[in-house]
Amino acid sequence: MRTMETEVLVIGGGATGTGVIADLALRGFRCALVEKRDLAHGTTGRYHGLLHSGGRYAVKDPKAATECIEENVILRRIMPHCIEDTGGFFVVTPWDDDAFGDRFMQGCRDTAVPCEEISIAQMLREEPHLNPEISRCFRVPDGSADSFLATQSVAALAQAHGAQILHYYEVKHLIRQGDRVVGALCYDLVKDEEVAIQADLVVNAAGAWAGKIAHTAEVEVNVRAGKGTMIAASYRIVNTVVNRCKMPADGDIIVPVHTVSIIGTTDEAVPDPEHFAIEPWEVQLMMQEAAKIVPGWRDLRMLRCWGGVRPLYQETKVADTRDVTRAYTLLDHETRDGVAGFITITGGKWTTYRQMAQVTVDRVCEKLGTVRPCTTHETVVPNPFEQGHGRKHHNLGQRLADVEEKEAFGQLICECELATRAHVEHAIIQGEAKTIDDVRRDVRVGMGPCQGGFCTYRVAAIWHELKKPPIEETNVTLRDFLQERWKGLMPILWGPQLKQERLDELIYLSVLNADHLPGPRASRLGPAMYEPGTAWESEHAHV
Amino acid sequence: MANNIWQAQLNIEAHTLKPVELTLDHCIKCNICVTACPVTAVTDLFPGPKYVGPQAGRFRHQGQPSPDHSVDYCNGCRVCNMVCPTGVKIAEINGRARAHIVQSGQVPLRRKLRNNLIARPELMGKFGQPLAPIANGLLHSGFGRFFAKLLLDIAPNAPLPRFSGERFSRWAHKRRDAVRSDRKVVYFHGCSTEYFEARVGKAAVQVLEANGFEVIVPSQNCCGLPLLSNGEFAAAQAYHESNIRHMVDYVKQGYVIVGTSTSCTLTLKEEAPEMLAYHTPDARLLTANTFDIHEFLVHLLDAGELKTDGLRPMPLTLAYHPPCQYRAHRLGRPSTEIMALIPELTIIESQAACCGVGGTYGYKAEKYDITMAVGKPLFDFVQQVHGPIAVCDSETCRWNIAAATGVPLVHPIELLAAAYGYEPEGPLAEVMT
Amino acid sequence: MNSMANDVLVIGAGLAGLTTAWQASRHGKGVRVIAKGWGATHWHAGCVDVLGYWPVDSETPATNPAATLPDLLAANPQHPYALVGLARLAAALGGLQHLCSDAGYPLVGSLDKNWRLPTAVGAARPTCLAPATMIAGDLDDDTPMLLVGFKQLPDFYAHLAADNLVQQGIPARHVVLDLPALAGRNFTTAVNLARFMQQSDFRAAVAQAVKPHLGKAARVGFPAVLGLEEATAVHQDLQVQLGRPVFEIPGLPPSVAGMRLHRILKAAIEKNGGQVHEGMEAIGFAADGGRVTAVHTETSGRPRQHRYEQIVLATGGILGGGIVTNHAGEVCEVVFNLPLRHPENRLEWFRRDFLDKQGHPIYRSGVSVNENFQPMDGRVLYQNLYAAGSTLAGFEAIRERSFDGVALATGYAVGNLVSN
């Protein structure tokens, strides 16, 4: 067994964990982060991509709304390349209460969320596919966020300041000595070996998995997994975030992210963040609700479906409420449970990740007896993939403009998402990809309409060329990625996408015969599948 | 459906078509369009229909400046649409993308001026035709060509037509022997017949009258296609609206519109409404009641109402190119079916995808070489058939093929008119004597 | 040439539709093919797969389709091959071989033996008929090979194929060419590479670049880009220049080899006086007294009617577009709204593994027909309507590797049926 030593160990490579490690590194701590898969593999990489203006909480949770708008302004400044300034609408559809619009306006005023009502004609000029029966429309500064790129960028910032990022390190259990946590025993999935990491302080930022992690140190943290199901349509049917103007409910938001439009989401408590199904009723409900906002939605091509698990914290003991808002929770297990060297940060949302990291690291400073001010609100996070775009907001046409400018038509590996060979090579080498799915999260290969139909073969070939692994490894890497794509397709396969998948089968089975290549059919780095869906009806859905 | 093909269909369903951009959802990336595209076959300046159409389409945002420019090398031939197994309207997606480039002010001034000039055959005709001898002399002189290239980037060897001595509509209106009948059709002559090739219009009138129709020649404008394919949508829409105003009342009286220019009829039927997303009830009426002349004649033939007796034999073997703008009507080959009625006439159909000219595309200096490379297989074919003339329905293709091969071209309706016994004019007259 | 009788209307221009039209036109019938666009020929490998794996979960390919087919028919009496019968299947293969030979592009093989040809990842692909341009790659022969890739072609990777072949006991090396003729280009596709290959100076440059790498290689493999209409000449010239057998390996679509088959079949139909119209989508029909009286196609203005004596539906399955599905889980045949066999429960459409050995049940959906390929719903639905190819129910073309065989055999059978 290998051993390692650090000052602060962060568990979880989502937005919160990478935010924490970047803040730690910027404040000069020696620190390491472990993530059991790739960065943003969990909830961070499986949300709808909304940069909150706070509008969604303006009525229901004013404190959260204010947090959101504060962070919204900061994130636009420090990581513009991860954000598209789409703006947002709140719309009153025929299914909604007209009067809620006034409560919404008032809520925005009370929480300092900028909001203006615009005419329906103006709304339709900007978004011609919206339901013309919409009766009111309010504009707010929502945006859309690339949570993969943001997580990568923040992690790269942390690394640049000396932090260690260890992905494909799964925490088997925390190491406890008496009433103190002193580190974690990890399993390196790639090297297939155990690694013991000693630390002065362990920060549990494992999101929906935080309860499981804490449990290994015999600390009970009641984090329930709230599954949200989302569907991406293959095209930007809207270019503005569109929210229903009502109390938050299932299927009430469409977010344009990169080349797709995402309808979200459901909210279902599931017993285990690892094992849950995408139920057919959820898919039906999303389709039905999306069509209330965009009437033609059901005829659009659905590209993919996924479920993310929100960490829903429920306090069973007396909480340490000093730094806590209803939006997220910081638990100091020394004061809460009498277990020193261990704190948990959970709950929250992507938009407030930086603030969560700030309060967490403030507490770390306190625990380690030092005073070091936070600078993340004024530290620009560079884009690790491309120089030059760092100071501008992302926009939809950027990749197309780049390909056109360089006339890089012949360099395209993923034609749907316009990912070039240089992108892929960078992700494999500098990005230290362990699977093609990691390459996807870095550079979007396989995320377009053909869902890897044409690029999986190309990426596998480049992978093989650059990494020179035994050929069976390349073969299983290819098959793992085909299966990873299939995972998110099954719940929404009909129409053109079903046709596409049959073409992809023709390519990989018949033309390439990739199912009869040497090597195992699947590896431990392959996707964890959803459980089979069975339920057509739900008792919990609220719309 | 109406009982008779010449009776306009007035009961039109409301528009239900999706915007053309949304058809990109059907693309399965299979590359069939790339295999068929005649432009990408000859130049790597054009990355192909899949890339510029359904792929780039996902990165375009009407609210932002156009991120791309390679789409401008699409010549609009629509071969991609024809072979696409999933129904993506690639050429229309490209046309709208080009308009977005134009609207975002991304076209350099000289090119913009040039495009606006060559996209206005009506304007050129109105000024040039009255001065036909001088204008022809100037346009076809080395001097004129030199300045056209210098000032406007017009290809020095562009296949420019010659103005006719008399406008077609003047001929039509001053005739004394016009047939009067209860069976009426409206004739859309388009700019080429009006200003450059009146003989095509005369042949159309003769054929229609020989079949017992009274031919109405209403006041009309350019169909707007050259403007559409240069991304000048506002001007194109003005023309389209004007044409609707001029003709829709005839349709409402029960008369259909017949045209000899395949690209004009395609524009009235489909291109203008789809590219401009212009689907008013009157526009729909026009769409549903406009016919290419051979489409119309085949309907008559199927109904047993086409005059097929006593056709004059034509012992000729001629190359025929079904232009891409004609195939884009998705009607099959009506002209071939009609020409087959003419005794002793042997028609050899080209298999070429496109002559390359793409309307105004081949007039642009930067695209002229592409045009000639695209058209080469067709030019070779026409020369191999070695007929005294060749046949093609579309005017710019005729001019282009003639300029490239030296073989004069005629419209297929001229053959039928001659077979009906009318005195031909132009190249056909020389062959028939 | 157009005064042909309106005998047979074929809807669909994949291998099934083209074969039907070729056969019917060969028998003197007036034939029109209408198709929304091109299809299956351009997607697949340009070979004729008849039966590659049976049972479908078998790890090893079928070596002799003629010997294995009876097992398939015994296990699945509804299979389209059962309707065709082995004799007609053999006749169809023979007929296509004859046609292609006459066109100067021989298809080599017989029903008694599957080739095992290398794929672009280096797996062994069982197929029954392959163009002469491919067969030197057969993996029953274990002589050393050199695989040649092109740096600018993103759809074929010689190193990946070579490493997998080595793993399977075939001595294989690779070389990736970076030719000056391609280096300055913005992009290179299989089709424009095939056009380049038809130029003798380009071929000479290729041969020149390959020669230093030949070593002990007894044969040389290229991506399937060795020419379009001049493939045989291109192939032979490279063999002469390299002094050893040369073979092609199909890569990602579009399939250059498939385009050649499409071209040959289309030319045969047109030579027999038939017409092939692409861009013509069948959108409806009219029927009277148990007969289809007209098929309607979409045009730029208004639907056009096609009145033919016999109608053949060869629009394909879910891939070809003959069968469509939607968000509500409906499965429909697009032209005649024929009743379909398909999984009743939508949750049974798919299995959990993309590469599942049995395949996903939804893809077995199709039209049930009688022994004369007439769509049935307990009884014959329309006296003059037939179906061929992947529109038919009850088989898994991709898992069986029977995609082209079923299309060819059923198209051949129907083409002959409508000619009698």
Image (spheres, coloured by chain):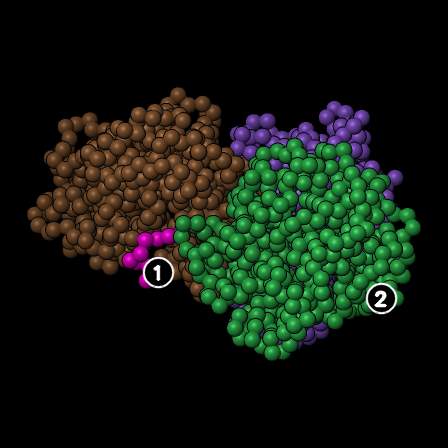
Within 10 Å of disc 1 (Cα), the crowding (few <14, some 14-19, many 20+) is: few
Which residue is denoted by mark 1 in the rendering? Answer: A386
Which three-letter amino acid code belongs to the residue tagged 1?
Answer: Glu
Chain of residue at mark 2 = B
Chain of residue at mark 1 = A
- Relative vertical location of residue C158 with respect to residue B208 in this rendering, above or below: below
Q: Colour of chain A?
A: brown
Question: Distance from label 2 to label 1 (Cα)?
Answer: 66 Å
- In the rendered image, residue A81, in percent from the top left (x then y), is placed at 32, 54
Residue C392 placement, left or right of A24: right
Q: Is the magenta stretch mostly helix, strand or loop?
A: loop
At x 47%, y 63%, the residue is B107
Q: Which of C133 and A3 is in front in this view?
A: C133
Q: Is residue B428 visible?
A: yes
At x 84%, y 41%, the residue is B305
Quadrant housing residue C171:
bottom right
Which three-letter amino acid code belongs to the residue tagged 2?
Answer: Val
- In the rendered image, residue B411, in percent from the top left (x then y), is placed at 76, 58
Give the mark toward the camera: 2 or 1: 2
Give the quadrant of the C terminus of chain A: top left
At x 56%, y 39%, the residue is B280
Label 1: state its secondary structure.
Answer: loop
Q: Chain C is drawn in which colour?
A: purple
Q: The green chain is which one?
A: B
Q: Is residue A10 magenta?
A: no
Which segment is the magenta one?
A385-396
- Relative vertical location of residue B196 with respect to residue B308 in this rendering, above or below: below
Q: Do the residues labelled 2 and 1 touch (CB within 8 Å)?
A: no
Which residue is denoted by mark 2 in the rendering? Answer: B431
Label 2: state its secondary structure.
Answer: helix
Q: Which of C49 and B407 is in front in this view?
A: B407
